[in-house]
Image (tube, rainbow, N blue to C red):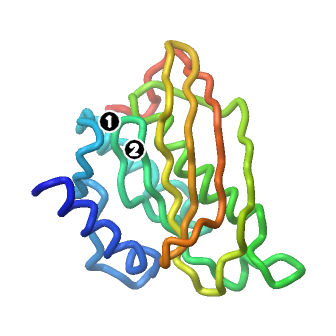
């Protein structure tokens, strides 16, 4: 499969991945974005951890893709995520961003913990919107790494931007077999 084909498939699947009842959506292990080659042992371990994570279940966060320094996560904006004005609560949007950030920053197989996140809320999504957060590594050193994270709705409207920094511990992920 060529990179362009995989990206087209991923974009076409985003809305379907937001729905809990979709059993036919592409599994993240089958996604090939061509961004970076990733150690399959690390990729499978991260996928397994995300699927079992209670917090991701609470917000119905769906991992679409993970590669070295990259992650894409989807979430359906539901009524229980509204703030007092009936708009998307910043905490719900932050949760989506943080999940993509967590996955991308730990995709090298070593523990990474957040040091700073700078978020800009650009627009409020429509009720029922399928949101996707894409985290891309911009720079990585032995001790830190920076990420650009963007949230779009299914119409490719920009909802949130985030610049984030992690501290890279010199420890392997504890859940690697």
- Residues tagged 1 and 2 counted as in contact (Cβ below 8 A): yes
Q: Which residue is mark 2?
A: 46
**What SS does tag 2 mark?**
helix
Q: Is residue 42 left or right of residue 102?
A: left
Question: Residue at left 23%, top 45%?
Answer: 34
For the residues labelled 1 and 2, the Cα–Cα distance comes to: 6 Å
Name the residue: 31% across, 32% down.
177
Task: Name the outermost residue toward the right.
Answer: 84
Q: Is residue 60 above or below residue 79?
A: above
Q: Where residue 69 appears, x then y in whole percent?
A: 42, 36
Asked where in the image residue 128 lies, by quadrant, the reply is bottom right
Horizontal arrangement in the rendering, residue 37 relative to residue 163 (left or right): left
Task: Return the residue at label 1.
Answer: 42
Residue located at (21% from left, 59% from top): 4
Point out residue 55 in the picture as x, y percentages from the top left corner: 61, 58
Vertical arrangement, residue 153 with respect to residue 138, above or below: below
Nearer to the camera, 99 or 14: 14
- Label 2: how many residues lie within 10 Å, few (<14), some (14-19) or many (20+)? many
Marking on residue 22: none
* Residue positioned most to the left: 1
Instruction: Give SS at disc 1.
Output: helix
The percent coordinates of residue 20 (x first, y second) are: 45, 80
Q: Please provide percent x and percent y for residue 111.
A: 51, 27
Q: Residues within 10 Å of mark 1 (few under 14, many from 20)?
A: many
């Amino acid at each position: 499969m060529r990179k362009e084909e995989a990206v087209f498939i991923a974009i076409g699947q985003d809305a379907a991945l937001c729905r809990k009842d979709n059993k036919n959506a592409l599994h993240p292990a089958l996604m090939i974005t061509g961004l970076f080659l990733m150690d399959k042992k690390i990729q499978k371990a991260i996928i397994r951890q995300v699927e079992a994570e209670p917090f991701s279940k609470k917000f119905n966060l769906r991992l679409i893709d993970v590669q070295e320094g990259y992650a894409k996560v989807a979430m359906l904006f539901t009524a229980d995520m509204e703030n007092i004005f009936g708009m998307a609560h910043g905490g719900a949007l932050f949760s989506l961003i943080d999940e993509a950030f967590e996955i991308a920053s730990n995709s090298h197989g070593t523990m990474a913990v957040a040091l700073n996140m700078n978020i800009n809320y650009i627009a409020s999504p429509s009720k029922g919107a399928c949101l996707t957060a894409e985290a891309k590594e911009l720079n990585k050193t032995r001790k830190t790494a920076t990420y650009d994270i963007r949230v779009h709705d299914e119409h490719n409207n920009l909802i949130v931007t985030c610049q984030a920094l992690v501290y890279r511990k010199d420890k392997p992920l504890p859940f690697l077999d």
